[in-house]
Amino acid sequence: MIRYAIIGLGAWGHCYADIIRKLPEVTLTAVVTGNPDTVNNIRTEYPNVTVVADYHELLQINDWDVAVVAVPNHLHFQIGLDVLNTGKHLLMEKPLALTAEDSDTLFRTAIEKGLHLTVGHQFRLSSLWGKIKELIDSDQIGVPKYAFIELSRNPYRTGENGWRYDKKQVGNWILEEPIHFFDLACWYFESFGKPVSIYASANTSLSTDKELYDNLSVIVHFSNGSHAVIAQTLAAFEHHQSVKVTGTKGSLWAGWSGVIDRTRHPSFFLKISDGNNVREINIEKPAGELFELEEQIIRMNLVIEGKAKNPCTGSDGCQAVTLSIAAQKSAQTGTLIEL
């Protein structure tokens, strides 16, 4: 049985904890809450789990195998590095770090230590978005030439103590959700190698920080001439995501909708066309963040046991951070960024 520790017990950390506690093949042995005032409450909520207020205390405890890091973005690098240097496997929420250099350090440290580092780009484990990858790889639409990945949603939650609206802590908002879409585009087009350039345009309705973009449009170019368009608005309502991919033999269109992103009752669909006929693809498992989070823990176990491939490696996480930072730079300068 693989033993998990969770560093960061905010809303997302609680989601991880609830899933780990219900899976039979894993156990939750320790949690770190950043708020000392809540330690006693957390101990009541998790009576059989070690609860500490400082992750350094966790590093002195040896009854865990994997750390799930779900803290504000600016803390990812140092905590992740300390976990790896302790000799433990790491499941890091996105972004891997706030800079490409720090992301690369985590990636290389995991390799040097012989440890597993998985980045929380859970869309790769989605029954819906993952089915698109299967269809592309099985040549159902030919060579993919264009992808459109778009999200329209409510404004972001503030996060504990408002960290998500603090640029020093969040880095930028492209590192929050569009980073997932960069990862999806690179995953869908991975046979073409790494992206070669990126161009972004963005603005915000915020009066406090003009660099926290809530309206974003990006074009990512690949070496074979294919490109992906990524768009997001945080100034809309509910949570609606769409992906369209066109290829040399056909095209597909998928959509997901929910009142909120963490709903267990979404609506979703996937259609494919060969240019003449359109058919709907049956998606057997429900799609959504909470379902994908469960798949992520299950897959992490299999990776550690040597029974499955890492769904999102440190290298993948580095690439997503690099693209996010390049998009931010392009939006600020109005220029095309060569990668």
Image (tube, grey):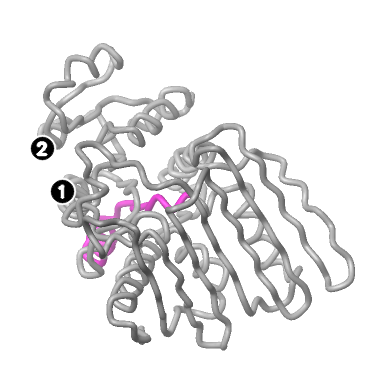
The residue labelled by disc 2 is 56
Position of 137 with respect to 23 (left or right) is right
Q: Does residue 200 sit above or below 20 in this rendering?
A: below
> Which residue is drawn at the image coordinates 17% and 15% (left, top)?
40
Q: Does residue 44 sit above or below 127 in this rendering?
A: above
> Which residue is drawn at the image coordinates 25% and 64% (left, top)?
210
Q: Residues within 10 Å of mark 1 (few under 14, many from 20)?
A: some
Q: Is residue 135 magenta?
A: no
Q: Does residue 111 sit above or below 57 in this rendering?
A: below
Q: Secondary structure at mark 2?
A: helix
193 or 153, nearer to the observer? 153
Q: Residues within 10 Å of mark 2 (few under 14, many from 20)?
A: few
Magenta residues span: 104-122
Amino acid, disc 1 = Asp
Mark-to-mark CA distance, 2 and 1: 9 Å
Percent of width and height locating residue 26: 42, 29
Contact between marks 2 and 1 (CB within 8 A): the answer is yes
Amino acid, disc 2 = His
145 or 113, nearer to the observer? 145
The residue labelled by disc 1 is 82
> Which residue is drawn at the image coordinates 42% and 66% (left, top)?
216
Position of 239 with respect to 268 (left or right) is left
